[in-house]
Amino acid sequence: MKTNLICVLLLSFFLVKMDAFAQKAVIKVACVGNSITYGANIPNRNKNSYPAQLQAYLGSDYEVRNYGISGCTLLSKGDYPYVKTRAFADSHTFQPDIVLIKLGTNDTKPQNWQYKDDFIGDYQRLIDSYKSLPSHPRIILLTPVRCFLTDDSSISAERIAASVRPMIEEIAWKNKLEILNLFNLLGDQWESHLLPDRLHPSSIGAGKMARQIGSYLILTAGCTEQDKADWLQGKEEFNFHVLYYSDDDFKYHVTSFLPFDKITSTLGAYSQYTPLKLYNDTFNRDIKILIDTLKIDLIHVFGHIQSSKRKKYPCHIYFT
């Protein structure tokens, strides 16, 4: 009788555990974008596009779906507006927990660029459409990848660098959204193995994108609004920065919600996306200087710095 009771209790315990495991919801990630997201020109893109490689990087706790459409524009008056595609509607039906938005490259074509003054407004409406979802997704903006097309190409490398990227940074700042810099990820000089046609990443280039995005998502997975809710209670606005470590280039990067021109003029070489030169023996001092200079209320530092003795410095959260 006693043995039977123990068996029943053990069985109940395992059933509860199995039920809890079954109910564990995966984190749904919607990758919104153009041909670079779609995986154009990548052999076996279903496995080698950046969203597919991101799925492999993040593992079974995540469900990553590719909603990229080749040739689409952010601009509603463009020649192929993303908001008029089936993928746009499907990405909403998916009810994602995270939305990664990477648009703007095709908007630099002459027939689309004539509507450039609508870019910020159209981008805002796109963001608002995801903000209104019942799933209340975390929205992360991705800057365009640098392209190396010649001046006579329909897509303008100069417009991407000088206009589209700064506008996306401004939109992120105004909405207090996270933004990841992919612009310099594939280098400042053309490498054929990363961008075979000077525009679309190869499977290797897509892998670098997936690693950059995936490492950021994993590092920031534990950062919630509750982490800072008590300290910020009653505070209408605050200046929040995220400093994260990239395993891809072994440097720290800062995401700022200050206007681009302000942080650049204040920090000089420590611009919004320039890797911060932080060394082990001056790490805390440099962070405090950054906080004091930018009048930061709260900064999260993710990852670690590894010294020559292979000692790992833990994550920090700084308050002023």
Image (cartoon, rainbow, N blue to C red):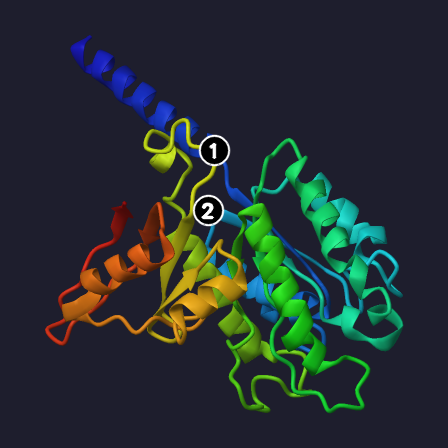
- Whether residue 140 is visible, yes or no, is no
- 173 sits left or right of 226 in the view: right
Q: Quadrant of residue 106?
A: bottom right
Check the image and report above or below for 253 versus 88.
below
Nearest to viewer (mark 2 / mark 1) = 1
Task: Give x and y (percent) for residue 284.
Answer: 19, 60
Q: Nearer the viewer, residue 123 or 272?
A: 272
The amino acid at mark 2 is: Asp
Q: Earlier in the sequence, mark 2 or mark 1?
A: 2
Quadrant in which the N terminus is drawn: top left
Check the image and report above or below for 224 versus 7.
below
**In this figure, which residue is indicated by the disc labeled 1?**
236
Q: Nearer the viewer, residue 194 or 139?
A: 139
**In this figure, which residue is indicated by the disc labeled 2?**
61
- Whether residue 299 is visible, yes or no, is yes
- 175 sits left or right of 91 in the view: left
Q: Residue at x 76, y 59 (%)?
A: 119
Task: Give x and y (percent) for residue 310.
Answer: 14, 71
User: Spatial distance from mark 2 to mark 1, Cα to Cα?
Assistant: 34 Å
Q: Nearer the viewer, residue 287 or 12?
A: 287
